[in-house]
Image (cartoon, rainbow, N blue to C red):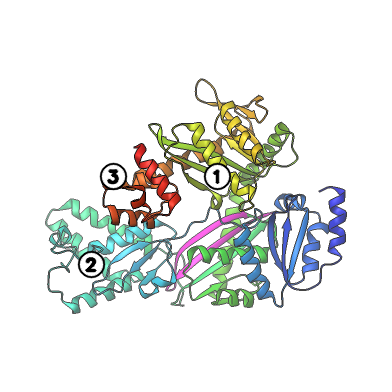
Amino acid sequence: MNEEVKEYIKEKLKLVPELPGSYQMKNKDGLIIYVGKAKNLKRRVSSYFNKTQTGKTLMLVNDIYDFEYIVTSTELESLILEITLIKKYNPKYNILLKDDKSYPYIEFTKEKYPRLKVVRNVNRKRNKNKLYGPYPNVTAARKTVNIINRVYPLRKCENLKKDVCLYYHIGECLGYCAKEIDHDYLDKMTNEIISFLNGNSDIIKDKLKKQMEKASLDMNYERALEIRDMLNDIDITLTKQKVSLNQKYNFDVFNAYRNNNYLSIEVFFIREGLLFGRHDTIINVVDEDSEALTEYIIKFYEKNNIMPKEIIVPDYIDKDLLSEFLQIKVSSPTKGDIKKLLDLAIENARIKLEEKEETLSKSENTRLEAIEELKKILKIDKVSRMEAFDNSHLFGTFYVGGMVVFDDFLPNKDLYRKFKIDANVKDDLGAMKEVLYRRYYRVLIGEEEKCDLIIIDGGENQVNVCKKIIDEFNLDIKIIGLKKNDKHRTSSLIDEELNEIPLDRHSNLFIFLSKIQEEVHNYAISYHRQIKSKGTLSSLLDMVEGIGEKRKKELLKKFGSLKKMKEASLEELEEVLNKDIANNLYNYLKSL
């Protein structure tokens, strides 16, 4: 931050009111890079500039060229505004939960003939069914479902068939599609399964022990060993819990331990009085513990959707505010078993951070060194957002493109993009030209954010193609190509002036650029495989820009086959598609 910017911010801070609200930090391009909230805007915003900062907070402050704020009537309004703006702008310094995954649940359907299955991305519409979890370990969830389906003859098929299947003949289904069902037996079976999923494993374990004894007496030792493994799985996934409480309801426990700019967060999932599972993560934060943990909790439930009856948090969290936002009970016990559980969570968080802090710090230092090395090579003051491109094709046809985005060498997967490429494109340079044109035309018209650096997998020709497009749009974006040697290994960097700069294979910069190169390559290939896996006709239609699932179904409904589609006139295609897309499809089909 230069002296001119410092003076500008100093004068602007004098005008900030001592009221609640949300503030937005901006970089030199006017882009929002951090969003926060405060009870007292003046005190909070000033704290970034009148204190000595370190780590990620120092990086944020050095990146700030301006700030804005919005005054709100209440702190709840400021929290809602903060979360809304974070969703809208996806600021690079806010908590993004990039590595957090949604957890699987076990779903017991409330159908006439119920089924049991593992589900992800649950939502409140599924609440008509019974959900158990979350299971931090997806293997445990699948094993649990497998055990229950082996012990109880539940319905296995998605839709009832016309006749019984193999599961009926091996005794793992009652033949719901064709047989008379004893509803009393079905109710008894349902109650036992629900009891098991609520933590009472005795009934199923007794059943399995009897089956194991019978298998041994019948000298069916393979079956006996299989049942023994199932009993072991029950002990591992359900009954061997470290904590057992008298509170027979569902709640989650959050606590965090901080050292320097790292916040280690531990979550315990308590289900029916048992410690059902746990989750831990370490994030690099720029805000106070209370603000960072509150933001994390809100995003955690946005991602996992199903909330428990109550959540337990440390006492420095604004419980009333969080409760009002999430619409559930939030508490901070000061004594008793749950307080001990809260203390256990922070102890686990501390241990986890101490185990990983040295590795994290080393990784952080190497990343920052790589950024400085890249800035020096390119002779620029700032390089933060990087976009890398690669194409994939099948025998020189059916091209697709992939774009990955990295902020300060950290992946920002929310901004990754896939591109369907015009069927007339038959070479790598043509495919790259189309992808780059489409991406940066959106930047030109202000629909998408501009990056600092474009990374192309290739040498002089590829860099030239990119440079022509960027120059045509008059965009100030640096370009580099990653050139391979005769052994097909990346060995040098090509800048936009076509200077070849050798890369030290042991340098931090080479390591991070290689990670980006590998990421975009795998991303483009996986998209191509995804398209091919849908089947020949579906794959061909997927290659046409503007045709998605809805239009694909309409085409298949009208024409029925690829042959009929190829025989159709442009006017017939226009009965289903608009003129431009119909023309694209018509030309594409004629080229096959």
Residue placed under numbered mark 3 in the picture: 567
Q: In this view, which residue lies farthest toward the top?
A: 486
Q: Is residue 164 found inside the magenta-colored segment of the image?
A: no
The reply to whether callout 1 and callout 3 are in contact (CB within 8 Å) is: no
Q: Is residue 436 left or right of residue 62?
A: left
Q: Which residue corresponds to the image point at 35% horizontal and 73% vertical from the top-left? A: 129
Coordinates of residue 457 in the picture (x, y in percent): 54, 33
| Chain-order first, disc 2 or disc 1 | 2
Looking at the rendering, the stretch of residues picked out in magenta corresponds to: 260-283
Coordinates of residue 107 in the picture (x, y in percent): 35, 67
Q: Is residue 106 left or right of residue 286?
A: left
Residue 120 quadrant:
bottom left
Along the viewing direction, whichever of 366 and 102 lies nearer the viewer: 102
Residue 80 quadrant:
bottom right
Q: Amino acid at mark 2?
A: Leu
Quadrant where the C terminus is found in the figure = top left
Residue 438, labelled with which disc? 1
Q: Which residue corresponds to the image point at 82% horizontal and 67% vertical from the top-left? A: 16
Mark-to-mark CA distance, 1 and 3: 31 Å
Q: Amino acid at mark 3?
A: Glu
Q: Nearer the viewer, mark 3 or mark 2?
A: 3
**Would you say the magenta stretch is mainly helix, strand or loop?**
strand
Assign a secondary structure to mark 3. Answer: helix
| Chain-order first, disc 1 or disc 3 | 1
For the question of whether residue 535 can be seen, the reply is no
Along the viewing direction, whichever of 484 and 171 lies nearer the viewer: 484
Residue placed under numbered mark 2 in the picture: 154
For the question of whether residue 321 can be seen, the reply is yes
